[in-house]
Amino acid sequence: MSQIAESELIINARGAIYHLDVTPEELATTIITVGDPGRVKEVSKHFDSVEVKREHREFITHTGWLGKKRISVVSTGIGPDNIDIVLNELDALVNIDFATRTIKNNLTSLQILRFGTSGSLQQDIPVDSFVAGTHGLGIDNLLHYYRHDNNDEEKALLQQFVAHTQLDGTFSPYIASAGSSLLKHFVNGFHQGITVTCPGFYGPQGRVLRLGLSNPRLIERLTEFNYGHYRISNFEMETSAIYGLGRLLGHQCLSLNVIVANRVSKQFSKDSGLGVENLIRKGLEIVAGI
C-alpha cells in the first residue's frame, strides 16, 4: 500500500495531526463537536475526569471519561470549511497508521455528535427547544469536492428541494442522512427534521443589513418545503458537511441543536447560554448510555 506524502498528511514533532494537535492515543471513538472553542470546557466540566487538553488555533480538544464512556469534545469553529479539516483529521487519527503513513486494514467507525445552536424555520419549533437533524442538506459546496452519491430517497428529497426553492443554477445543493444508530436515541424531547447548512450567517441565511439578496424569498421557501413526512426544521452552518463527510468516511454522525432564534416568529432566546447548557446535559446523559 502506498504511503501518504508528508505534504498531504502533516504530522508535527510530537506525532500529532497538524490542525487539531492531537495524537491517535489522545482521541476517543465517541466525539462531540462544538463550534465555539469556549464551549469545550462547558461540555468537559460534566466529565468525571479529563485526561487530555489540547489547543491549536480555534481547535480545542478535551478527552475524558463520563462513567464508563471515554469521550472527546472538539471545537470546530464556524462553517463547512472548518468541518472539512476536523472530519478529515479525526478520521486520519483512527484510520491511518502514522508510523507507516498507510491506511489501516481494519477501519474504525467513530460516533460523532454535534452540540450546536441553530435557527428554527417552523413556527411550532420554538426557541430553547432541541432538534435532531434527520438529514443535512447543504447549500454550501463542500461535498462536491469529493466523489459521492445518494440513495433513492435522498435523490427524491433533493430533486423536490431544488424544484421548490428554485435554487438550481444558483447553488448545487447536496444531502446526507444522519447516522441511524445514533438518531434513534434522540426522539423524546427532540424535534426531528431536515437541517439545512448555509455557507454564511447573513445573506445565505436571508438576513438583510445593507445588502440586497439574490433570493429574497429563501426563508419562506425553506419553511414551506415538505416531502412525504419530511420538512425543514432548522438551519445553521455545519451539519451537512459533518453528515456528508462522515458517511463517506464510514462514521455515524448526528447533529443536535438548541434553537436560539425562530426565523418565522422573529424571536430570539432570552437565555441562549442556558439553552446550550440544557442541551449539553441532556445530550451527555443519552450519549453516556449508548
Image (cartoon, helix red, strand yellow):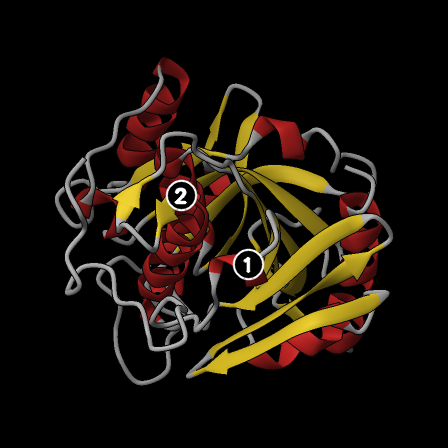
Q: What residue type is labelled 2?
A: Asn
Q: Provide residue 1's location: percent of width, then percent of height.
A: 18, 35
Q: Nearer the viewer, residue 254 or 222?
A: 254
Give the answer, above or below, for where 40 lies relative to 92.
Answer: below
Q: Which amino acid does label 1 sit on?
A: Glu
Is disc 2 placed on a helix, strand or loop?
helix
Name the residue that disc number 2 marks.
Answer: 95
Give the answer, above or below, for where 274 lies relative to 134.
Answer: below
Q: Provide residue 119's location: percent of width, then percent of height.
A: 57, 60
Residue in the picture at 32% in, 69% down: 203
Give the mark nearer the N terminus: 1 vs 2.
1
Q: How crowded is mark 2: few (under 14 residues within 10 Å), some or many (20 or more)?
A: some
Of all residues, the one furthest to the front in this rendering is 99
Residue in the picture at 24% in, 41% down: 166
Residue in the picture at 76% in, 46% down: 287
Q: How far apart are marks 1 and 2 (CA)?
A: 12 Å
The numbered dot on residue 89 is none
